[in-house]
Image (cartoon, rainbow, N blue to C red):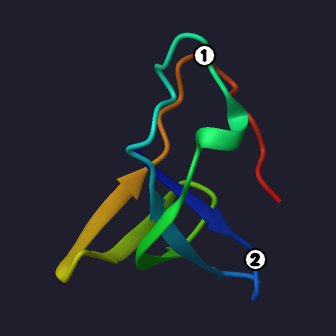
Amino acid sequence: MLSVTANKTAPTSTPGRCTDDRSGFNAVPFLPANIGLTPVGTLTLTFASGNSATFAYTVNGVVQTKQVTRQIFRTPGTFCQ
């Protein structure tokens, strides 16, 4: 499972690091001490507006860029600031 920790550093940019866990979130019993996060890459979210962004990442040497669009399921939606 991949997870991301990202902190806003500028009004439109949020860089972060990707980590991987293969040590047992599904283990029974679940033991938090057994969870180990391994750094596997980085990412940056760059916001063009409150409705669209670019998601750029490198994970295990694979580089990808994806466009992200907010989906509004009910009007009027929400207002991002």
Using the image, tell me which numbered label, if any, was put on residue 74: 1
Q: Is residue 24 visible?
A: yes
Q: Which mark is residue 35?
A: none
Q: Quadrant of residue 32?
A: top right
Extreme top residue here? 28
Pointers 1 and 2 in contact (C-beta within 8 Å): no
Determine whether the residue tagged by mark 2 lies in a helix, strand or loop: loop
The quadrant of the rendering that contains the C terminus is bottom right
User: Three-letter amino acid code at disc 1?
Assistant: Arg
Q: Nearer the viewer, mark 1 or mark 2?
A: 2
Q: Residue at x 54, y 75 (%)?
A: 17
The residue that disc 2 covers is 8
Question: Which tag, 1 or 2, sits closer to the chain's start?
Answer: 2
Q: Position of residue 39 (x, y in %)?
A: 47, 73
The image shows residue 53 at horizontal and vertical percentages of 47, 66
Amino acid type shown at disc 2: Lys
- Residue drawn at (46%, 20%) of the image: 26
Seen as rendered, the residue at the extreme left is 62
